[in-house]
Image (tube, coloured by chain):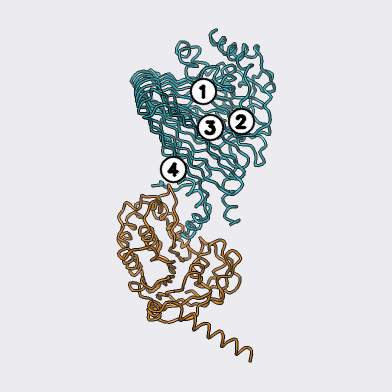
Chain colours: A cyan, B orange
Amino acid sequence: MSDSSHDIESLANREYKWGFVTDIEQDTIPPGLNEDVIRHISAKKGEPSWMLEWRLKAYRRWLEMTEPHWPHVHYDPIDYQSIVYYAAPKKQDGPASLDEVDPELLRTFEKLGIPLAEQKQLTGVAVDAVFDSVSVATTFKEKLGELGIIFCSMSEALRDHSELVKKYIGSVVPYSDNFFATLNSAVFTDGSFVYVPKGVRCPMELSTYFRINAQKTGQFERTLIVADEGSHVSYLEGCTAPMRDENQLHAAVVELVALENAEIKYSTVQNWYPGDKDGRGGIFNFVTKRGRCAGRRSKISWTQVETGSAITWKYPSVLLQGDDSIGEFYSVAVTNNRQQADTGTKMIHIGKNTRSTIVSKGISAGRGQNTYRGLVEVHPRATDARNYTQCDSLLIGDRCGAHTFPYIDARNSEAVVEHEACTSKIGEDQLFYCQQRGISAEDAVSMIVNGFCKQVFRELPMEFAVEAQKLLGVTLEGSVG
Amino acid sequence: MLEIRNLHAKVGGVEILRGVDLTVRAGEVHAVMGPNGSGKSTLAHVLAGRPGYEVTAGEVIYENHNLFDLAPEERAQEGIFLAFQYPVEIPGVSNSYFLRAGLNAIRKERGEPEIDAFEFLALVREKLKVVQMDESFLNRSINEGFSGGEKKRNEILQMAVLEPKLAILDEADSGLDVDALRIVANGVNELRREDRAIVVVTHYQRILNYLVPDFTHILLNGRIVKSGDRELAKQVEEHGYAWIEKETAKTSQAEGRTLQA
């Protein structure tokens, strides 16, 4: 027994390969938060005055709010006055043409597997690269522009597409939504903006890669994706950070709006630094992600693979407003060592005949604590609403924990809500069965874990599914078939 | 091929095997019979190297290896196959992926090149006939939602693909109806070969009607107390195990007296 569980744990204890620091001259402001800091950030970005007003409104609201402590996670109090709210590589005046981007930054992203240089760009994927507080480059912008698709950094959008941003920002996650989202509304520095016009099917994957580099910095990005009537877009976000002893706060907001017949597929491979094996350092990933199926027959699908961060607190949700709209949530969350995750989704059925699917796979190893928390809410007029929830936990070793908190609130008698849950351990039985067929314990564990996650991985775009499998510290030869 | 000498083993601190001796040569089929709790399954699992089974004395030589020097996967790679009494379910992993991973691990050990998905499919199609299974089995998750009969047939399919030197079938017939039993037994018969030994561990002799053994051994209280041929199995069918128990008790009493004298 001890041998095989040791194998499982050592497999899970793969090293964090993205923990390097880029040595680059930074333009930072002193730690601390007040109205001047917000004015400073807004001025740095040359934002329209309405944006500054909105930020200040949020800040004043935030001062009256208290940090939520209902999640099933534990951490020392965060000192919001010791965080640096703006850090950017110097001589960077917004995303310029690629020739003007500091070669050191290009090298950093190349090292992370995100080549930005024109000749090396990933085919079929347009990337917005965000380094600390600013976007450093966006690829394939012109090509997408020909179709009327806007894909740029949030700062740029606020300058060039101010009216569009104004119309939709805060329309899904209001500035007063919750403690972390409100903080984000006050101090957000960059992020991506996507607008897909009527009837356009975006021909490539859009992707944002977030990198925290500077010390003691918080990353507060804000992403807004709007899919106009009958359009279709698939978007992916990835992220890494250096290994540092202190915790760093990442409080992002993502808003999605799908109009009539539009479809947004949003995939995340979250690989922030998780801290060391004793729980020192790591990112606090406190994120608000929400989509609004505003129009009829619209669809929003969240897929997330959460392997990093010391603490993950996020509930990518869907407001199903339009009749016949569809919301989906597919999640793999892994906690190892001292990692903690409290994650899940909210599916709010407002329109008639709305449907939602939730598939959550939690994997706990080491002393990891993994919580699924989900809400399925059916409003009185949401006749014929349907939800299917499947919520599975896999335990590796005997010092970890899995917890499930499903909330169901059905206020329409015709609604059909199904919930299935199961918890299993990688059994010695399963391991021995594989070994008896000649497969090593290590390969057996990766096979079992991948099998467990298969339902979620198949929702990811092909290249990223491969990445996700690698991230789980597993190799999978050929296809799973 | 397999030489078991004075094998003692404990499970959960309780001694189950108390001095098993057994010799198996290539080409032979041995039936190991015994009532519940006699140690049949323990013997099978000890040979395959299941964790939690503690060998306290004795030795097992397999193909010139000291068997206990080998990890479970190494034993499999060296050609030992255990058909499980309760085959394990692994959700999300397809049968074909699993089988190919096992086959390639064994081929690698033998210094043979790995087999690709296309070659594998051609190979496995032939093997499916052995157990009368259709191709849809390959894409299903390992044993998940399989009926009892399907699970047992799946074990024999794996045996057919992995081509072991020594196959140990642990209660291959339990829970099977007559038709499924015939398919499983005939499947194994097709896999009988000059260079392959088969050990059938069973409570009932009915599988031996189809899968005729060269030798029958009776395991009682952790020891092989009686060996014979096919006829011994039939005697057990007719009279149960009680008469052998009595006979053994007498023998040990006699031994006791001899010792006292």
* Residue B245 appears left or right of B146: right
- Could you tell me which secondary element the residue under label 4 belongs to? helix
Q: Residues within 10 Å of mark 3 (few under 14, many from 20)?
A: some
Residues tagged by mark 3 and mark 2 found on one chain of the structure: yes
Which residue, given by chain and number where applicable, does mark 2 sit on? Answer: A284
Q: CA distance from mark 1 to mark 4?
A: 33 Å
Check whether the beta carbons of the residues at disc 3 and disc 2 lie within 8 A of each other.
Answer: no
Relative to the observer, which residue lies in front, A313 or A253?
A313
Mark 1 crowdedness (10 Å alpha carbons): few <14, some 14-19, many ≥20: many
Q: Earlier in the sequence, mark 3 or mark 2?
A: 3
- Disc on res. A48: none
Q: Residues within 10 Å of mark 4 (few under 14, many from 20)?
A: some
Could you tell whether A358 is left or right of A182 in the image? Answer: left
Pointer 1: what residue?
A: A137
Disc on the earlier residue, 1 or 2: 1
**Residue A110 circle label:** 3
The residues bearing labels 3 and 1 have C-alpha atoms spaced at a distance of 13 Å
Q: Secondary structure at mark 2?
A: strand
Q: CA distance from mark 1 to mark 2?
A: 26 Å
Q: How many angstroms separate mark 4 from mark 3 (CA)? A: 29 Å
Whether residue A318 sits left or right of residue A221 in the image: it is left
